Image (spheres, helix red, strand yellow):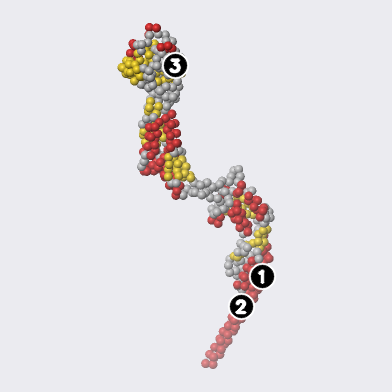
Amino acid sequence: MLEEMDEMEKEELEVVSGKGKIVIIVVGIILAALAVFLISFCMYYRNRWYMGTTIAGVEVSGKTMEESKKDVLEQFKGYSLVIKGRDDKTVTITDTDINLEVNVGEDWDETFSSQHEDSFVPLAKSDSYESALQVTYDENALTKLLEESVLIKGSGDSPVVKPVSAKVVFDKKKNFYVCKQEVQGNHLKKDFLLNAVKESLEQCESELSLDNNPAYAQIYDTPKVTSEDQALKEEVTKRNKVILRFVTWNMTKGVKEKLTPKTIAGFISYKNGKVKYKNKAIEKWVKKFCGKYETVTKTRTFKSHTGKKVKVNPGDYGWQMDYEKTLTQVKKALKKKIDSKYINAYIKEQSAANKKAITLLRTPTWLNKGYQWNSKKPSEDWDTKNFVEVSLAEQKVYVIRNGKVKFSCRCISGLPVPGRQTRTGAFYLKEHLPSHTMVGADYRTFVHWWVRITWTGTGFHPATWQPWGSWSPTLYRSRGSHGCINLAPSDAVTIYNLTKYYEMVFIH
């Protein structure tokens, strides 16, 4: 029995041994095949770039040096560089424009050798290799092309704009100062542009973007001052603190005069961080303001007792502001402190309420006033239905009431010689005195019923010394006064009673 078992075990061992030999043989064959494949694989890549290799951006896996060079150079046939600048300014440079030629660099051979020395297995250690390309071109042609391009010279619809610094300006719509944004412009620095283009050409890049490119931050001229400048912001605040106010005068019924921030802006200058007033500009405005409401100097035309229109020279009747007091008033209003909260509120919203909060009301200061203000016809400032007319040619006085002659009488005016003739013009009646002493260089005369016409001495008064019984329109040539309007005693009383203070008197 034991012998039979030994025989069986021997047979089994022989079978197992046979199978092991087969496995060993198969493995050997596989390994041999792999070795042959590996040797063949390595031999194949001995003169070729390893798998996964890119050079100068071109896939060269499995290609020989000559093949890879040919493929790379093929990529640059018909080469062009697109240069993109600000404001959609674009220039394209082609290889024919500048006679550009591209060749591979000597470092290709070094890179190839280094790859094969570093690794026996034909698999690239890195995904790609950077390799310089030998680029040649006509620099003179390139320089000329750039100088003549839209980037440098601009065009009709796309001009070259130089940078402009931010600055403080008065906004007419808002009525206050603002910081006007800087203008970046599109003015390129020629040398910087040329260098940037050369770098792109040498790298055979297809596109060069100049705007917002950190690598070329200095390629455009830049404004010296931007809106973020702190000094600029301080200037805006200080200017607005001074000019933000509306000064209003109620001139006459329904007529207002205003001094606005826009006008005040012309009164100031800013230097070394301080606001200063330009006194001459203020004085000029005040003179214009006063002149606008001045009629004293106006020539007037009135309807005479005859129904005809008569032109009369200026006298002292009419509207006239006090320039000195008005100037002082304006300067005080300009320097009056206004709470910053009201100023800031107006800057935020130009509403009627916010405007009212920075409005200063002032009363006009007059030297003289007329009966009425006629904005369309300023010289018509008297009561056209009630006035006094003195005709020197007729030597008569006419009191007009409700447009008609209420009273008329004879008169004797000044002797027609220098220093005594009666002055013509438009005057207002200044005083009514029941008694008055007239004083001159060679006389001192007491009279009753004095009605003053001018401050220099001309007035209506009775002249008992005149020969009224032999009066004629030419009597004044021999018996003329010192400039006054002599009246018969009874007529003087009537004139005294009929006329009124500040009434217009036309002497012609």
Q: Amino acid at mark 2?
A: Leu
Q: Which residue is mark 1?
A: 47
Instruction: Give the residue drawn at x 42%, y 43%.
Output: 275
Residue 227 visible in rendering: yes
Q: Spatial distance from mark 1 to mark 3, Cα to Cα?
A: 131 Å
Looking at the picture, tell me which residue is in the foreground, 140 or 506. 506
Considering only order in the chain, which callout, 3 or 2, is on the residue closer to the N terminus?
2
Residue 464 image offset from top left, x and y in percent: 35, 11
Considering only order in the chain, which callout, 3 or 1, is on the residue closer to the N terminus?
1
Q: Which residue is mark 3?
A: 417
SS category of the residue bearing label 2: helix
Q: Is residue 436 above or below residue 36?
A: above
Q: Is residue 316 above or below residue 134?
A: above
Q: Which residue is mark 2?
A: 31
Relative placement, left or right, of 106 versus 472 is right
**Label 1–label 3 contact, CB within 8 A:** no
Instruction: Give the residue drawn at x 42%, y 22%.
Output: 315
